[in-house]
Amino acid sequence: MHRVVALIRPPQSTFELGCAAQVFGIERRGLPPRYTFGVCTEEPGPVATLAGFDMLVTEGLDALDRADTVLLPGWLPAQEPPSPAVVQALRRAHSRGTRVVSICSGAFALAHAGLLDGRRATTHWALADELAERFPNIQVDPDVLYVDHGDVATSAGAGAGFDLCMHLVRRDQGARYAAHIARTMVMPPHREGGQLQYAAPPHPSQIDGTLAPLLEWVTERLDERVTIDSMAAHAGVSPRTLTRRFAEQLGTSPGQWLLAQRIAAARDLLETTDLPLDAVARRVGLSSATNLRRRFLNALGTTPGAYRRAFRAKARQTRKQGARQSPRHQRLLHHPQFAADGRAGAR
């Protein structure tokens, strides 16, 4: 089990803490538990929250020594540096290989501990200038949702903490495991870290009767050549109108949305099949292994081959449970070209 420990302090934001607790601390029906979640503070006892009530925290800083991931769900006031004991505990955890993660203003505590020196990082856009001014050795990106270096990760404010937590689950357990969590929370399963902080995804009720069937139509044809013009024609609107509706309802462009679907489908196939990379690329409409690698690197910071190797053991187990395969995976796997593609190993 992967142990996640949140380090909190008064006044603690319950929203950022809740994002992490909902992702890592809830057992879900039909999903094997992979995480345990706990909370600690520098001085165990009642911890005041921004919601007006106190939380009773019984674990102290020594809990960080037993963590696989240390998470700071905000740090208020951001101007107040952590104590030497907290700094030492964070550095000690990081030095022994623990992943250290911050949400929103939690980046300030990591900065004081020196864990962001020489790195790219993010925080809430309203605090980005202050973080950059106080810590000039950090490359502060005020626009993105999150930045993940593997050993250290930072997210923007509020809901971006959920995006980072889900990204970490996908990295640890695979896209299907993460999608299951997202479905139980009635949340979108994935927003790329590079997406703008201001471009929030819509509530499903915001997707109107024209756009919703179009999205389903496109996802059933990822192996085909789909363009903005063909999408607009299917929806019965002009390309300009379609682009506007995507921006209003999905916070992105048709092209960016389509690419995200292709990459998500490729991840599914890489996790659950032994198809060659060229076959995976054709199956999801990315034409070639070279294009697939380039898109993967840009979106995920890794190659398809490395991604597949990381999840090969899980993929073998999942393939034995065909009844649990996603509808999209079933469509892609039984595509007419499958017999020609074969099941050769990854290139």
Image: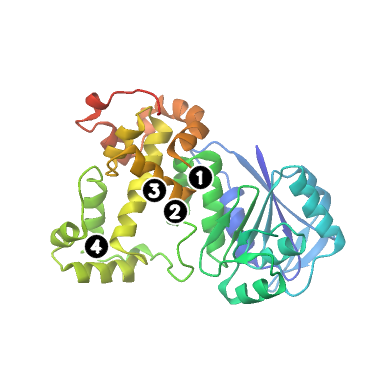
Give the left or right position of residue 264, taking residue 245 as reference: right
Cα separation, mark 3 vs mark 1, equals 18 Å
Q: Nearer the observer, disc 3 or disc 1?
A: 3
Asked if the residue under mark 1 is in contact with the one under mark 2, i.e. CB atoms within 8 Å, the reply is yes
Lower position in the chain sequence, tag 3 or tag 2 = 2
**How far is disc 3 from disc 2 in space, using C-alphas?**
16 Å
Asked if the residue under mark 1 is in contact with the one under mark 3, i.e. CB atoms within 8 Å, the reply is: no
Name the residue type under label 1. Answer: Arg
The answer to whether residue 327 is seen in the rendering is no
Contact between labelled residues 2 and 4, with CB atoms less than 8 Å apart = no
Decide if residue 314 is in sight here. Answer: yes
Element at label 4: helix
Within 10 Å of disc 4 (Cα), the crowding (few <14, some 14-19, many 20+) is some
Taking depth in this image into account, of 237 and 128 the one nearest to the observer is 128
Instruction: Give coordinates of residue 156: x percent, y percent.
Output: 57, 65
- For the residue marked with disc 3, what is the amino acid? Arg
Labelled pair 1, 4 in contact (Cβ < 8 Å):
no
Residue 211, numbered label = 4
How far, Cα to Cα, is label 2 from label 1? 9 Å
Q: Nearer the viewer, residue 271 or 306?
A: 306
* Residue 248 percent coordinates (x, y): 32, 71
Q: Quadrant of residue 132?
A: bottom right
Location of mark 1 (residue): 170
> What residue is pinned by disc 2?
190
Q: Of marks 3 and 1, which one's residue comes earlier in the chain?
A: 1
* Image position, residue 259 (x, y; %): 33, 52
Read off the residue under disc 3.
Answer: 295
Q: Residue at x 75, y 59 (%)?
A: 114
Amino acid carrying mark 2 in the image: His
